[in-house]
Amino acid sequence: MPAYPELLILRHGETEWNLQGRMQGALDSPLTDRGRQQARAQNAVLRSLDLSGFRWFASPQPRALHTARIVAEGNSAPLVQDPRLREIGMGDWTGQQRRAIVAQFPHLFDGPNPLAFYDHAPGGEGLAALSARARAFLADLDGPSVIITHGITSRILRCLALGLPTGAFGALDGGQGIVYRVAPGGYSKLGPDGTEPQPIPQDFV
């Protein structure tokens, strides 16, 4: 694994567009009641840890920032917004429902990576550009960090921190209301029910 500091990586809570299956990208929609509950669950997980010396970072997009402010309740460290943590841009697919994209481009969903379509959005940012800004963000870290971001950005950050090629992002778990820990001691998922070790996809090691 690369020599990054300990990372606690979180995805924002459920949003209205998540419920509708819409691609959010650079646009936004409000957290649902469940999304706020998921953020409170993340807050409870983090409160159970000793986060002395951790810095806190968040994507400036409203759904992530709203989540971050709930997650950070009770913590005195400043919350730094970093645009490099925003979600992958979806170009012409922004606001479209996933099922409409599947119907129009079924071949993008036939391969082993069910998320590969994110790299094919017309006018979209693409995985290479997302990976470049995620790598730049990680390179600037000088200590352990809590990072509140988005689904695809979270996966790319974890790929880089684990030393995996970014093409492995679809093999990593997603999910809302949980915390992923990447540290020299291992890779794990922290949730309300405790710690669950996470396997590193062997096909990419």
Image (cartoon, rainbow, N blue to C red):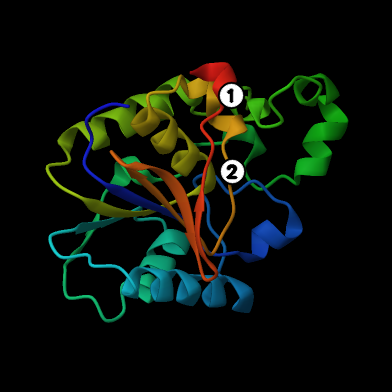
Q: Which residue is mark 2?
A: 173
On the picture, is 128 further left or further right than 91? left
On the picture, is 158 further left or further right than 72? right
Q: Residue at x 32, y 27 (%)?
A: 1
Give the image quarter of residue 203: top right
Counting from the top left corner in percent of width and height, residue 183 is at 31, 43
**Residue 12 seen in render:** no
Q: Residue at x 14, y 47 (%)?
A: 143
Q: Residue at x 61, y 79 (%)?
A: 33
Kindly state the secondary structure of the residue where label 2 is placed.
Answer: loop
Q: In front here: 180 or 18?
A: 180
**Residue 152 seen in render:** yes
Q: Give the alpha-carbon distance from disc 2 to disc 1, as whole Å.
A: 18 Å
Counting from the top left corner in percent of width and height, residue 104 is at 84, 28
Q: Are marks 2 and 1 in contact (CB under 8 Å)?
A: no
Give the image quarter of residue 92: top right
Rendered image: mark on residue 70? none
Give the image quarter of residue 52: bottom left
Rendered image: mark on residue 119? 1
Decide: few, some or many residues near mark 2? Use Cα within 10 Å; few <14, some 14-19, many ≥20: few
Q: Name the kind of residue labelled 1 in the image.
A: Asp
Give the answer, above or below, for where 161 lies relative to 177: above
